[in-house]
Amino acid sequence: MPGVHDRGGWPDDTPIDLTEHEYSDWERRVDAVHQVLGAQGIRTTDEMRRAIESLPPDQYESLSYYEKWTAALEILLIEKGVLTAQEIDAKAAQLREQGL
């Protein structure tokens, strides 16, 4: 059975949005972290794809492109022991409290 990411041949009448997208600051940061982790050998393209494709279907469907990257990077950082889920959650809570 194909995964939610495997769209080849699935009928869909939704038009493709071809408009230019202005990147927000957080999207640029995610891209920067992605590049740095790749340059440091902490993540590979294949690992990113696997992590994105492992997202539960409802999460995969609801996340934007860079939100999927963020979720995948979190998965990989935890898998590799760079950060724990608790450390990530604590930092996210701290940033929310600061209004960031």
Image (spheres, rainbow, N blue to C red):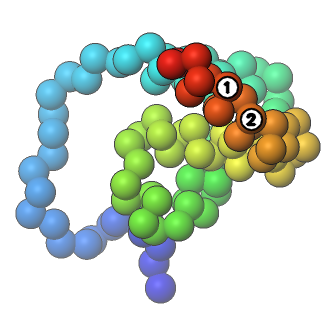
The residue that appears at 33% across and 67% down in the rendered structure is 8
- CA gap, disc 1 and disc 2: 6 Å
The residue to which callout 1 is attached is: 94
Q: Is residue 80 left or right of residue 37?
A: right
Q: Is residue 91 left or right of residue 20?
A: right
**Extreme front residue here?**
97
The residue that appears at 10% across and 50% down in the rendered structure is 15
The residue to which callout 2 is attached is: 90
Q: Name the residue type under label 2.
A: Ala
Relative to 12, residue 70 above or below = above
How many marks overall?
Answer: 2
The residue that appears at 9% across and 63% down in the rendered structure is 13
Relative to 94, residue 44 above or below = below
Q: Is residue 92 left or right of residue 87?
A: left
Marks 1/2 in contact by CB < 8 Å: the verdict is yes
- Coordinates of residue 65 in the picture (x, y in percent): 41, 40
The residue that appears at 83% across and 51% down in the rendered structure is 79
